[in-house]
Amino acid sequence: MSMIIKITKGIKISVETFYQEEYSQPLNNEFMFAYRISIENQTKETIKLLRRHWFIFDSYGVTREVEGEGVVGLQPMIEAGKSHQYVSGSHLKTEMGRMHGTYLMQRMSDGKQFSVTIPEFQLIAPFKLN
C-alpha cells in the first residue's frame, strides 16, 4: 500500500488507504474504504486542527462535499515536532474513487488561522486491479 504525502506550511500530511471488504457489499454498489492520516507538525509552533473540508469523488462522477469541526470528533493540539494520527472512512457507490481536501489550522501563539492541503488519494477496491 503506497503512502501519499504533502507538506503545506510545515505541516506534513501522510495518507494510507485500505479497502474494507468485510463492510462492503459490491452487489449492492456499497464499497467501504478506510484511510489513516498522520498530521506531523514540522514547525516550531503548537497548532490546533479546527476544521476539515473534504471532496469525495466516485467513478460515476458524483462529488460529495463534507465539511465540519475537527477530525473524528477531536480538535487535536499538535505541538512542534509532534504528530497526530487518526483513522476514518468513506463509502462509495463505485469500486473506485478519490478524495482530497483541506484542514483549517490555528497557530496557538497568535491565533492565526491557515489552511493545509490534504493531498488527493485514490480509493480502489483490490479486485479492480486484476
Image (cartoon, rainbow, N blue to C red):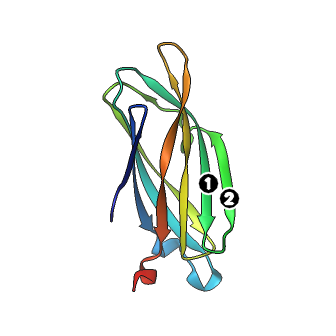
Mark 1 secondary-structure assignment = strand
Query: Which residue: 67% across, 53% down?
Result: 65
Q: Which mark identifies residue 98?
A: none
Image coords of residue 115 (percent x, y): 54, 34
Q: Is residue 97 above or below residue 74?
A: below
Furthest toward the top, the residue is 110
Q: Is residue 18 above or below residue 39?
A: below
Mark 2 secondary-structure assignment = strand
Query: Which residue: 60% across, 86% down?
Result: 27
Furthest toward the left, the residue is 81
What's under tag 2, amino acid-wise? Arg
Image coords of residue 116 (percent x, y): 50, 37
What's under tag 1, amino acid-wise? Phe
Q: Is residue 52 above or below residue 65?
A: above
> Mark 2 touching mark 1, by CB under 8 A?
yes
Counting residues from the start of the chain, the first of labels 2 and 1 encountered is 1
Q: Is residue 107 above or below residue 94?
A: above
The reply, left or right, for residue 130 in relation to residue 27 is left
The quarter of the picture where the N terminus appears is: bottom left
In this view, the residue in front, 103 or 27, is 103
Query: Which residue: 66% across, 70% down?
Result: 61
Determine crowd level at label 2: few under 14, some 14-19, many 20+ residues with C-alpha closer than 10 A.
Answer: few
Check disc 2 and report the residue beneath it.
64
Check disc 1 and report the residue beneath it.
55
